[in-house]
Image (cartoon, rainbow, N blue to C red):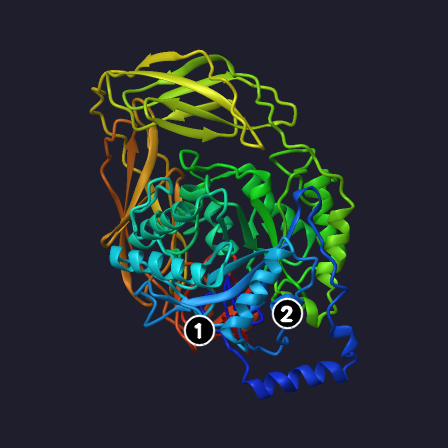
Amino acid sequence: MEGNSFPNPKEENHLTLPRFRLPRRLAAACLSLALAAGLSAASLSAPKAVDAAPAGGYKIVGYWHNFDNGSGFIRLRDVSPDFDVINVSFAEPVGGSATGNIGFAPYNYTEADFKADVAYLKSKGKKVLISIGGANGQVQLASTAARDTFVSTVSGIIDKYGFDGLDVDFEGHSLYLNAGDSDFKNPKTPVIVNLIDALKTINSRYGSDKFVLTMAPETFFVQLGYSFYGGSCISCDSRAGAYLPVIYATRDILDWLQVQNYNSGPITGLDDQYHTMGNADFHVAMADMLLTGFPVAKNAAQFFPALKQEQVLLGLPANGNAGGGFTSVAEVQKALDALIKGQQLSTYKTRGSATGYPNLGGLMTWSVNWDKFNNFEFSKQHRAYLNAIAPTAPDTQAPTAPGSLVSTAKTASSVSLAWSASTDNRGVTGYVVSYGSSSLETTGTSATVTGLSASTAYTFTVKAKDAAGNLSAASSPLAVTTNAPSTDTTPPTTPGSLAATAKSSTGVTLGWSASTDNVGVSGYVVAYGSTSVETSGTSYAVSGLTPNTAYTFTVKAKDAAGNLSAASSLTVTTDAASGAAAWAAGVSYKTGDLVTYGGKTYSCRQPHTSLQGWEPPNVPALWLLK
């Protein structure tokens, strides 16, 4: 929770950099400097101890430091009463990240006093959760034995201290996707599958009506999945979007998701524009992705469905010391005005609901300690704002059923459907197309179902869905029989005029003229060495190549029947490496590598594979300006 997460600068390093905890003497010195700078001891004392209940279901969640990092120690019972949920951070792995063995010991507390403070907060109506992971606490449940140990040790911690639930703050390399694990609804990677099993088991042990389950991933692991999905893309980080299968599999038992909207590089929103942290625009765009849903890796067949409004909280730093991307109180409340009240920003318009999300879950902050250090600005100001909003009754009204379901096209392996739009009291957010035991979600009034069997009868129905998760009655069923297997054996013509339109020491951009086919070209296969990739256009940028190396590229056209054309081929030698090559996405950089970007030279600070959006000026945790 505390470190560098996208990666990008943060109070302590959260994803790829180690978390640095200050020695106690240095921490005390930092606090003394703060006092000398004008923060009096009185200004750092707790606010009046009154019980503050969330209005309209709007929660404020804060993380409590189980260590000393210069923000100042605070007893649990002295946490601002404006917080509704306190996450004790962190329980961490014992004996290595792969054991599944999780340990926790209270810092600067006797065990009895810590238990007493947990009980005190619970007596005041607060929820106290144990948060697992953080920057130092990478957890990889790669085996069923590690999974079972995780369940056992986490349950033991919850029982021992009386925690109300569990917050999952897996960071670094805890979660990743194996190559080819492209379906977030049916993950295959062991660290993903075992975590899902473990969370379901722990939840079942305590019961969903009593147990609180939350998650605090970074934008890298969630919203970045709209652009890149680690199991399905070439030359991108295998961790991109890796929380999505976990969130999807536990969505029925997940109380809320509090994505860290800080320490993040620019993220592409549903408007296909970059959004940069630290302002209302970023928070609205990031939340809207979760409240609207999105196609993972922009694949319409892999649609991540919207969460319920009350399941979404905005994660924020409590002050400028707590993390990169600190957002002022005014900007946070501008974002809340847009999300809760529907007062749209000029820079980004919500896609899921033009009138807002009145049942939004609330706010999370790193941390209660930094909140106290900053004279409780975060908890005081935002509690007053949220308490002033009148509660909104839950939406239980389902949309009307979709009408006029028809088939607009079909092949031996696909059926295209269309229907008339449904209506809803607060707006329709999407549709669920069902056939047999399968289903897919879409935001429009049409969809193409692929992967079907030839000469087979299928019955399709469609239901409308609103932002509260209410489903309409099903449309009238539609029976469609797919076409017989294709008898088309005519391949497309060979792509012409294959050329390198640009190149560097690590990349080559290819272009070619379009092929023709008797029934139409569906795409092109670009191959080099043992790598191949499909693209729908007549150009492709290959990255991650070795400098001063000859590569032979081939391009073949492909039609809907799977026929491949003859290949066009081209040999290109990449440019020689210079002392400072131009920065590029998809390149594995090591410490000390020099790159140029925007006319400036940068030195690599830590090994990583670059992604679009991680340009050197955006991620100073990775690049040092020379």
Q: Nearer the viewer, residue 77 or 9?
A: 77
Position of residue 285 measured from the top left corner of the image (x, y, whole percent):
61, 46
Which residue type carries mark 2?
A: Asn
The quadrant of the image that shows the C terminus is bottom right
Vertical relation: 114 (above or below) 278: below
Q: Quarter-wise, where is residue 525 in the image?
A: top left
Q: Nearer the viewer, mark 1 or mark 2?
A: 2
Q: Residue at x 41, y 12 (%)?
A: 477
Q: CA distance from mark 1 to mark 2?
A: 29 Å
Query: Which residue is drawn at the image coordinates 75% and 69% (left, top)?
Result: 375
Name the residue carrying label 2. Answer: 369
Looking at the rendered structure, the number of numbered marks drawn on it comes to 2
Neighbourhood count class around disc 1 (C-alpha, 10 Å): few under 14, some 14–19, many 20 upward: some
Residue at image coords 52%, 78%: 21
Image position of 617 (left or right of 388): left
| Relative to 604, 482 lies left or right | left
Is disc 1 placed on a helix, strand or loop?
A: loop
* 380 sits left or right of 22 in the view: right
Disc ID at residue 606: 1
- Mark 1 or 2, nearer chain start: 2
Q: Is residue 36 visible?
A: yes
Would residue 271 be visible to someone looking at this image? no
Vertical arrangement, residue 164 with respect to residue 114, above or below? above
Residue 141: percent from the left, percent from the top? 32, 58
Residue type at mark 1?
A: Gln
**Residue 218, relative to residue 519: is it above or below?**
below
Q: Position of residue 457 (x, y in %)?
A: 28, 14
Q: Give whichever of 559, 46 is nearer the camera.
A: 46
Mark 2: secondary structure: helix
